Image: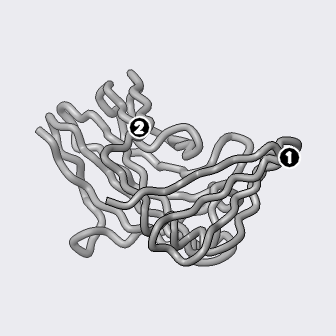
Amino acid sequence: MSSVIIAGDTSGSITVAAPAAAGTNTITMPASTGTMALTGDVDNVLNTYATFVNSTEKVTVSATAATGTINYDTNTQSVVYYTSAAVGDWTINFRASSGATLNSVIATGESITLVHLVTLTGAEYRNTTVQVDGSSITPEWQGGSAPTAGNINSIDSYAYTIIKTGDAAFTILAALTQFA
């Protein structure tokens, strides 16, 4: 197993060196700005030596019923779980927050994957419209077509991978899975 050596100094500079990696890499973190400047082959070191055993995602559990337009704030959660039974079809609008667009926080060539869990009881309600920053986008649905109904007496899991392809341009891959 390889290790990464991290050494700091009083100037706010951190040096990352990995055995078997070519050279050293510097990450400078000035205290006054809170931003980082990366130099050297940092991507190589981080991509080669980063190991994740487990990670967690923020889940918002809400005793809310799906209906109308649901504003999904991506800056505060990865999963939203509505535990009250849906009372109608709904539109989901992905945005960074009430004051920031998703377009402004992800770059072209980046993606984000989000999940909306919806409780259904005696009615087949479903997500009928998908929006990013208030603009409708037709998703590419797993299996080739959008669902025509939800699944009664279950939790429907909608997974959306939003890929930014240009300025305010997105491709959305969507899937519906029933859990009963």
Q: In this view, does 32 lie above or below 110?
A: above
Q: Which of 132 and 21 is in front in this view?
A: 21
| Residue 139 x %, y % | 41, 68
**Residue designated by label 2:** 80
- Dot 1 or dot 2: first in sequence order is 1
Dot 1: element: loop
Q: Which amino acid does label 2 sit on?
A: Val
User: Which corner quadrant of the image does residue 136 belong to?
Assistant: bottom right
Residue that appears at 47% across and 67% down:
19
Q: In this view, does 123 lie above or below 161?
A: above
Q: Nearer the viewer, residue 78 or 179?
A: 78
| Residue 51 x %, y % | 37, 55
Dot 2: element: strand
| Residue 133 x %, y % | 63, 56
Q: In the displayed structure, does residue 161 sit left or right of residue 42?
A: left
Q: Which of 38 and 63 is in front in this view?
A: 38
Looking at the rendered image, the disc whose residue lies closer to the viewer, 1 or 2, is 1
Identify the residue at the far right of this view.
32
Neighbours of disc 1 within 10 Å: few (<14), some (14-19), many (20+)? few
Q: Nearer the viewer, residue 52 or 136?
A: 52
Q: In this view, does 107 lie above or below 152?
A: below
**Residue designated by label 1:** 33
Residue that appears at 23% across and 48% down:
150
As drawn, the label of residue 175 is: none
Which quadrant of the figure contains the N terminus?
Answer: bottom left
Residue that appears at 39% across and 55% down:
128
| Residue 44 x %, y % | 52, 73
Q: In the displayed structure, does residue 148 sit left or right of residue 109?
A: left
Residue that appears at 39% across and 27% down:
61
Asked whether the beta carbons under mark 1 and mark 2 sit within 8 Å of each other, the answer is no
Q: What residue type is labelled 1?
A: Thr
